[in-house]
Image (spheres, grey):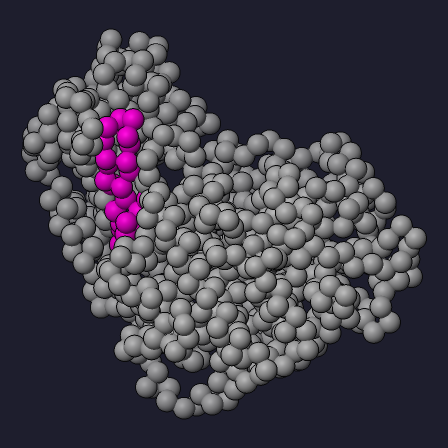
Amino acid sequence: MWGQGQDKSTLVNTLRDSCEQDDGMEGYGWTMYDARIGGSQTIHDSPGYVDITTDFVKLEDEESWGVQVSARMRPDAPDHVKTAVVFHVALEKAENSDVKTLKCTKARSDGAGMGTNATACYGTDPALGSFEFYVVGDGSNRLVEGPAVKSLQVPEDEIWQAKSVFTKQVLAGAGNQAGYLVDAPDLGNMQFIQMAFEGAFTVTFSYRTASATLLAPDDVKNRIGTFESRFRKHVDRVFPRAAPFDDDRYSGFSRALLSNLLGGLGFFHGDSKVDYTNATEYLETDPGFWEKAADAMGRATVTNTHPASLLSHVPSRPIFPRGFLWDEGFHLLPVIEWDVDLAVSVLRSWLNLMDDDGWIAREQILGPEARSRVPEEFQVQYPHYANPPTLSLVFPILTSKVNAAHTYLGHRSKHLSSANGTSAMLRELYPLLSRHYRWFRRTQSGSFTDLYPRPEDAIMGEGFRWRGRTPRHTLTSGLDDYPRANPPHPGELHVDALAWMGASAQALREVAEYLGEHSDAAMYGKDLDAVRHNLDALHWDPAEAAYCDTTIDAVGEFQRVCHLGYVSLFPLLLGLMEPNHPNLPAVLDLLADPARLWSPHGLRSLSAADPNYGKDEDYWRGAVWMNLNVLAVLRLHDLGTRDGPERARARSLAARLRRNVVNTVYDSWAKTGLFWEQYNDKTGAGQRSRAFTGWTACVILLLGLDLGGVPGGGRRGGTSAGGISVAASLLLFLSLILLLVFRRTLSGVGARAMECWRTGGAKGLDRGAYEEVIDLDECDARH
């Protein structure tokens, strides 16, 4: 934590700890980050007149790491600016324990060469063994107070509330008149180490287990310098940039996209609030079902589950610091190019949260700390609520890497290094994804009883609707306020829900084929065919020339409800339309129409001609969202490489949309230093949540996309193979036929020649398998 150190009141009012949406920072973010090695972050604290850099590095022994915090005065800083810095550390479940101890004190003069102003802390823990860490300031610092230690025994539920605990201590008189702690070191499950500096300063925090090497301040600095040069080369190798994005100004942009996505990786642990009552109202089969469901929720007994753990990237550190099922599949699209083993670890962690029925809570709000960032009305999770199964997007990319159909240039992967390892990994994950797929088909199924009429050519039973609908929202779809039929009706069917089932069936079919599960593959192929058929039979509206949701009207007739936007594009976005599909020209017309979806900054979420455009909450009602724009570019690119009547137009649209999307995100980043949740379709300005480098980071996949020869596209260069890897991999997911052709061609050919592609890795950055680097056992009871 840090704050302005002039006096007690100023310190308390300016103290910074957690990352907040409106904290006055002028910008912040990771300039480089790799989960295996470390990273560097900058924070521009204009109210405090300091720019802070935090550097983090880990040693290969996995038992030592260091953090260096450096502050430089901003150009407008007055003289004699004071900054207070507080390092806080706590040991969980040590409140009344003899085997878990933590004590801090002034370091011995010979303490690992740390000097006389260092603070040393020593502890024991059954899982960690003996450990120690040091906090030491640079010799050039102008230290005005400290270092002072405050040792406390606090209740377990205060362990995570460091800012609150510290503030109470200062206000209660534990410090002097200036707000600085009086040195009082002792045993305690929570320890505060405070220093105050005038002007610029550097402080290093070094940790090691008893037998490991300690990182001295110079070691941290030198390792960060070495890492920086290697990181630049590795990013350019894995995500090369093609014209018009191949000049130097996009180099830092590319690194920032990747670093802030990777820097949003978190390990979460705690209980969840779940309503397991399975009230009959939750079936949502009656008119006015949303009101009856709300009443049942108000009466329901909420269960606090057993603690669970999750390794996940977060959409946004300040506003959404937790795991979201809808987001994570998109997060993993760039991650799997950078580090397959990290992507697999995250996939495994998410899928292991699944219950016996196949349900995964769409928001993972684990423990009281996570709940403190969520309004109470949104904390409870419901086992009849789904979310788009975006994790299925990742599996076709995995199989393409396994088949060596495309290059993999990321970290060395244990999962790609041998056929046995690959098969074992897929055999572990495949049944979990299959169970989740079956749960979705069962719980989100549409009604095909005699109560509601359906088109005669529709395949009965192959249609879906999102549960959790209200007249204003369909939060479970991920598209929140996107307009649907109003009022909601139990006979509704939703385009995007059906399309997601098609995408999942396609992914499962590919994995089943790889594993030799031919009967499964045939079953998923049949499901896929049925989805494709019913997208046209149920949801295609000839008058609107678009895919639309359906409902039952006031006289009991089947009716299509058309609000043109992202929902209308899902059959295209998820690769369910072949190049010769009769509806493809009309879908491209919709996509390319400036009066409807096309804007200079990307595809609008809702047509500008829709009566709901820009109205009410205006969340998914016109703004440009980058995750689905990236899918659109990749899908158009795919269609532009395959024979069909729309090939030339699709390729041109891909090039133009790629340029618009990348320029929009880049221009906003260059102006604000941040990535954003969504972008204004009129101005291109970033809006809503700031520091949103979750799925917005997917834009990195477009920088190296090969669109040579198309105005606004790229050119093929010597490094383009790596750049098209993720695009081609994702497009294989979007085009099953093309994948099967590649598999027949590549089967049994050049296996040894492909080995370097399969194992990949930039030399000098490899650290072995991801699990070997961080060693997270999610079933471990050590937390």
* Residue nearest the observer in this picture, 752 or 328: 328
Q: Is residue 410 visible?
A: no
- Indicate whether residue 51 is drawn in magenta: yes
- Indicate whether residue 323 is drawn in magenta: no
Which span is picked out in magenta? 29-54
Quadrant of the image for the N terminus? top left
Task: Residue at 44%, 69% (x, y): give it.
Answer: 655
Quadrant of the image for the C terminus? top left
Residue 4 quadrant = top left
Q: Is residue 50 left or right of residue 491?
A: left
Q: Is residue 359 left or right of residue 664?
A: right
Q: Position of residue 297 (x, y in %)?
A: 73, 36
Q: Position of residue 719 (x, y in %)?
A: 29, 74
Residue 439 quadrant = bottom right
Q: Is residue 504 left or right of residue 316?
A: right
* Residue nearest the observer in this picture, 546 or 449: 546
Instruction: Indicate whether 417 appears above or below 609.
Output: below
Instruction: Indicate whether 420 appears above or below 746.
Output: above
State whether the magenta stretch is mostly helix, strand or loop. strand
* Residue nearest the observer in this picture, 630 or 346: 630
Q: Is residue 232 visible?
A: yes
Task: Residue at 28%, 52% (x, y): give it.
Answer: 32
Task: Residue at 24%, 36% (x, y): give it.
Answer: 52
